[in-house]
Each structure stands twice: as C-alpha cells, then as structure tokens.
Amino acid sequence: MLAEIITIGDELLIGQVVDTNSAFMAKQLNKIGVSVFQITSIQDDKDHILQALHDAESRVDIVILTGGLGPTKDDITKKTIAQFFDDTLERDPEVLKNIENLWKNHVKGKLLQVNKDQALVPTKAKVLMNKLGTAPGMWFEKGDKVFVSLPGVPYEMKALMEHQVIPKVKAKYNCPYILHKTLLVYGLGESALAEKIEAWEDALPKHIKLAYLPSLGKMRLRLSTKGFDVKKVQLEVQEQIDSLLPLIKDEFAGFEEEEGSVEIVIAKQLVKLGKTLAIAESCTGGAVAERFTAHSGASNFFNGGVVTYATASKTDVLAVPKDIIDTYSVVSSQVAEAMASNARHLFKSDYALATTGNAGPTKGDSEAEIGTVFIAIATKDAVYSEQFNFGNHRIKVINKAVNKALEMLLKEIFKN
Amino acid sequence: MLAEIITIGDELLIGQVVDTNSAFMAKQLNKIGVSVFQITSIQDDKDHILQALHDAESRVDIVILTGGLGPTKDDITKKTIAQFFDDTLERDPEVLKNIENLWKNHVKGKLLQVNKDQALVPTKAKVLMNKLGTAPGMWFEKGDKVFVSLPGVPYEMKALMEHQVIPKVKAKYNCPYILHKTLLVYGLGESALAEKIEAWEDALPKHIKLAYLPSLGKMRLRLSTKGFDVKKVQLEVQEQIDSLLPLIKDEFAGFEEEEGSVEIVIAKQLVKLGKTLAIAESCTGGAVAERFTAHSGASNFFNGGVVTYATASKTDVLAVPKDIIDTYSVVSSQVAEAMASNARHLFKSDYALATTGNAGPTKGDSEAEIGTVFIAIATKDAVYSEQFNFGNHRIKVINKAVNKALEMLLKEIFKN
C-alpha cells in the first residue's frame, strides 16, 4: 500500500517553516504497513494543488494533504479540493457546533463569519471531527483510492492522524507489516563500519534493506523489510541482527527506540537503576537538558540542570573555584570536572554531566581554540573528562558536544 | 527564476529524519531572487530518482538534489545522475587529494577503496569542492537549465550552498529581488486579526501576497513580493506596512529578523540596553535557555540558567523556601516569582525569567491541572507572574510556555 504526503504552504517553499508534519505522518503510516512513496511540498496556489493531486493519484493509493485550511484568504485548499472532486461546499451542522463550542470554551472572542464558514465542507467528504481546532479533517474516496485533507497545525494534524485517519486506513486496506530496526553505533565512521560488516551485508537477503545514517558523533544502521507474516518478518530480522552484533560488539550502543533517541535508552536505564542525573552546561547552553525534558517521565530521574553561560556564574552558582578558572582557563578539564562534581552535589544526584567549550564563531572568555569542548562525568566514585575538537561551525559544535555527552553518559551507566 | 529541491533518502519517507535542509536551501535561494516552486522528497531508488529529475526538468530552471552521495551501497545518487545525463564516472584528482587530506587531518583511519571512489565524478559535472566532507558537490548544465547535486549532511550542504551554489546561480541568471517582511503579532487569533485588517488587506495590490502564520501563542503576518527594482519593491512594501501598523499598534511586537525568531529581537534589545538575563526553568526544562544559546553572541547578555526539574532542586539550588512550596504547591505564582527573583540574584542579572508548570501527561509533584503554567519575570524593581493553561498535550504545553515566556520578556524589556 503506497501513500503520498502533500504539504501545502508558501512558508515551506520560502524556508520560513521546517516541515515536521511529514515525518510524523510517515512514521504513523509505516506502523500500519503503509509505505510513503513521496513527500511533496507545494504552494498555496490552485493550479499547483490540482496538478499535485492529479500526479499523486497516478502514483499511490492514499493521498494525504496538510495545510491551507485556515479561515483567512490565503487558505484555499478546501475550495480547490472541491473543484478537484467536482463538488460543492455545504454547511455541516456538527462541525459548526464544534466551532461554537471551541469559541465558547477557549477563544472567548466574537465568532466571525469566516470562522462559521469553516463548517462548509464538500458534500462528498466524510468529516473527520477536529476537536482541537476549527478546521475539520476530510476523507474522500474515489474508486479504490483515498484522499485525506488535514489542517497543518501540528497538534491538530497529529490528533486527527492518530484517532481518525490511521484507524480508517487500517479498516479499509489489508496492509503488510513494516519493520524498521535501527542500531546505534558509536566510534566508527560510515566507511569503516561498512568495511567491517561487508561480508554480512553482502549476504543480506535482497528484501531486507540496509541504510547507513551518519550524523554528528554517531552512526545509525537501519534494517527495513515488510511482509504479511509478522512473526516471520520479526524472526528474519532478528536472525540478521544476531549475526551482525558479534561483528560490532565494541561499537554497538543499543537499539534506537521508536521515539528515535539515545536519551530514551539512558532514561530507561537510569529509572531501572533507580539513579538520578544532574547536568551542568556551558557551551551546550541547555541543549542536553532539553533532550531529556522533551520526553515525559523525565522527573523520574532528572533532578535538574544549570546553564552557567557567563564565566562568573560558574563560580557564583556552581562554586567552581576562581583560582581553577584563572589557572587553567574556563575551557579546561579542571573546570569541566569541577562543574560536574559540584552539580552532582548541588542537585543531590547520582550522576552529573558537564560541558564547557568554545562553540564559536568568536573566542569567548578563553583562549581555547574554537571547537574545543571538555565533557566531564561525575559519579559517586569518580570524576573524569575528555577533550574534543568539534570543528568551527557553531551549531555543529553544539550538536556534536550534545551527542558526545550522551554517548559518554550511556557508556557510564551501562558499565555495571 | 524557479527552482525545485529534491531530497533523496528513505529515512525521510519513513519519518526517521525531519528534512531541515530544504528550508535552509529555500531561504538561501529566495535571498538571490530564485523562487522555490516545489520540494520533493523521494526514495533511494534509481527509477524514482530518474522520474523526479525528468519531472523537475519540465517544471523549473534549477534543480537541486541533496542526499545519497555517501560511500556505502545504499548511496546511489551519483550513478543515477550519470545515467540521467548519459555520462560515465571518472576519477577527479583534486577531489581525491581533498579526500586524502581529510583522512590525514581528521579521520586518521585507513583510507578505503570506497572512500577513494568518492572521487569518481561524472565527466559532464563541474566539481563543487566540499572541504568539509568526502562527497563532492556537482554542477551540471543542460541547455539553459542547471542541475546541482549536494551531500545531505547539513553542514556540508550549507557550506556548499553558501560558497559555491549561490554565487554561481547569481552569476548565471538575472534574478529579481524577492522581499519577505514578517510582522510578529501577539494577543490576536488568526480570524480576529484578519477582521481587524480586512479593509487594508482588500486594498493590497495583487502582486503583494499576504500570509497568516498562526503558531502556538503567536501570529506571524508575512508580506511577500518581488521585482527587479529593489528600491521600488522595498518602498512599496514599506508603504503597506506604514498603513498596517496603526491598525495593530497594541498587538505588534516587532519584525521577525532574518533568522526567524523573537529571541533575536530580545537579544539585540538587551545588548543595546547593556542588560543581562538569567533563566530558571521547571516545566520548560532548558528549552528557553536553548533558544538563546543556539545563537552566537549569547554570552553578551545571557548570564546563565537553571533547570530545577525536581521539586527538591528548587529549594537546594534556587533557595525557594520550602514553606512556600508546601503552602502554595510547586506549581504556583509564588514559586514562579521566587524562582525568578532568586535566579536574578544567583546569576547577578538585571532580568530573570522563570517557568513552573505541569506539562503532563501525568501530574507530577503538584495537584495543578495538566497544562497549568506560571511564568514570572523579575527585574530590579519588581517581580510579577501570570498564570496560563496551555491544554493537555506535552510538547504543545512546553512550546506555548516558551513562546509566552519570550513574549512577556519582550514586553518587559521594551517597556522603557
């Protein structure tokens, strides 16, 4: 079963907004056995939308559109879909009631005609009620093909996907089981990893696809396949992994979970151990803490963190001795270790992680070369640090430092 | 002048990776007068790549591809492009030298045949030397159309775009000037804003496009147009803005800068005032600090921040009196204000911002309803807070809280 995602909005094509909706939708569709053939981002333009609908219809079974359903004049998706289906708009009383309720309970302003007009729906559409917003989702069938139109507001789209689109697609089509299994691999470059597992890769059955996903400071290796016999698919992939793992036993750091991140592996292990974590950040500026707190349940292990960005705050807040800073500079293993150690005590935690470095583009309160980062780990028994140089591109330095810090922590908590 | 961006990679179509490259490229192209007609994400599949190249060629002048240029077997873009141009691959000695240098200076492992093979380039390509990685960029001309292939690694792609692709496109084509001007508007919903400025919008010349971009807790209003007379284009848009501003004088918060964020407006104002900032975060978990530290120059005003995630750390680190927490609960205006006030003193800052709330999905150390967030601001003269309910979706609650906190800070620092 193949799908195409069409995202509509000039803001995507001028680069004002990054399209995060597509990845979410693709993941949801994969889970129920629908492969996404293509993602197409187009303008808020009638002819462009019509053309994209025609093209997608020729390629796939399921077409999902997002965007362009708002109440203002630049929102033209609904009218254009009606034209595509040679249809007219009619007021839907249930949708109108939903809009009136939203207004009464949340917006509390005057209900305008443009808001009421959001209850106008093509007669051939089945309404997918959007309880979080005024624009209804719409489901169309044409022969054995399905067209779905959803609002572009991410949390509205997500709720409609999860509670309405996915169950309806599952009910309508007999889809295979799609399995992706991603291994996190640290300490090997893409080509070195490929060489190491070459014989294994060459023997991989053709219907299991292998992908290398290098990114700053880590590698991901993904196996993908599909089939109608769930058990058989799982067993087959498991057998391949069983023969792969001995080849990379020193570099394998775990499986990427559904949510796609090493911090979840760390979180689960800390909760399992009943241990807590504190984070002291300088050059990473809160980005490590944010990786943990973006997920629910962080309060089960994350006591807190401190961003001591200014040099003075390292002494004021973390009590890093001023003479250590004066002697070794603020970007040094001594300062990183003092930060980790003091954060551990301040937040009464079992583990603490600290970063200090110079992300550039200009040198700060230290003479350290741009890209230099020290990362320290403090445990109840020891404090240690490592020095890195992550190059001279600010965002790259920060991201590499975050990933490397997570890697060091991962290794530490899996030691025992 | 029209362009299409084609991003290649199964990881995009299964939702494992969010495509951030396209937005960057689109922004860069817009700056030199090239409009992006469409963005197409396709699979690592020969037939799909060939089809996408043919389709794009029929639609636009400039086709830019990213991805699929790595050294491993799943990378097939280069071979497929050679087939599209009916071309063969030849070793490029300059590219090989670059690869050998990268190996000597950074990778330091064994240089494998697959790495050397990255120096194989179609004979019809002009090489765009990639100093940050082993995969060269490639520039092809076919009639008056241009095809560019770039690696998908974001910082490699960015450097190649900025230093090679953009200058070459500028030199080859006579492009118009594209102007986007985005106003940040707070406190009005999309339809209420539209009603308020309806007469102005109706009188807008057809060639100036207006877009409403609602997002959690803020509205952006974008005017877009283009033309060959830069001064005339600028003047015309400025005249429209001059007649728009009096209509929204209470809600207008400033222009969105190139980088696209309110935190840059705040940063500039703080630097201008010579004032400093500290941040104490609970439910936002470091996300507010991270918004500031993602940009260079943050050390000019940002003293630091603390993430007091666990209740105990609010007393341990920020010295929030335990009886205040016991009396009012950890999610309360009293705690938010104590956090802001104490963070201001701890970090010796002029301003401090604090958040405490319950982002869900389950209740934490407080009985507060999920979605409840208190945001406090401390200045040298006052401490105050506001209470919000941001609904029951975790990421939405966090994002709304971050945006609302930035909005409150923005208002505070522009008071005088």
Image: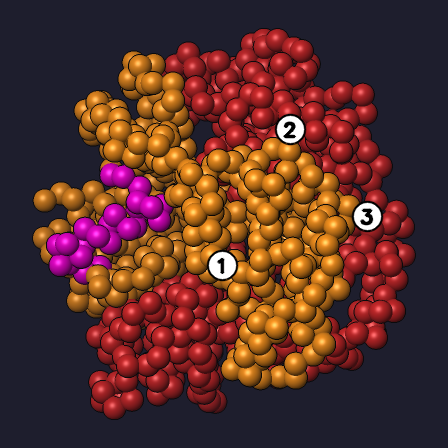
Chain colours: A orange, B red
Q: Is residue B363 magenta?
A: no
The residue indicated by pointer 1 is: A160
Are dots 2 and 3 in contact, CB under 8 Å?
A: no
- Across and down, in percent, residue A190 comes to 38, 26
- Chain name for mark 3: B
Q: Residues within 10 Å of mark 1 (few under 14, many from 20)?
A: many
SS of the residue at dot 2? helix
Amino acid at pointer 1: Leu
Is residue B372 rendered to the left or right of residue A11? Answer: left
Residue at figure coordinates x 49%, y 61% from the top left: A155
Give the number of the mark in front: 2 or 1: 1
| Quadrant for the N terminus of chain B in the image | top right
- What's the magenta region? A254-277
Q: Is residue B272 visible?
A: no
Q: Is residue A263 magenta?
A: yes
Give the number of the mark in front: 3 or 1: 1
The residue indicated by pointer 2 is: B52
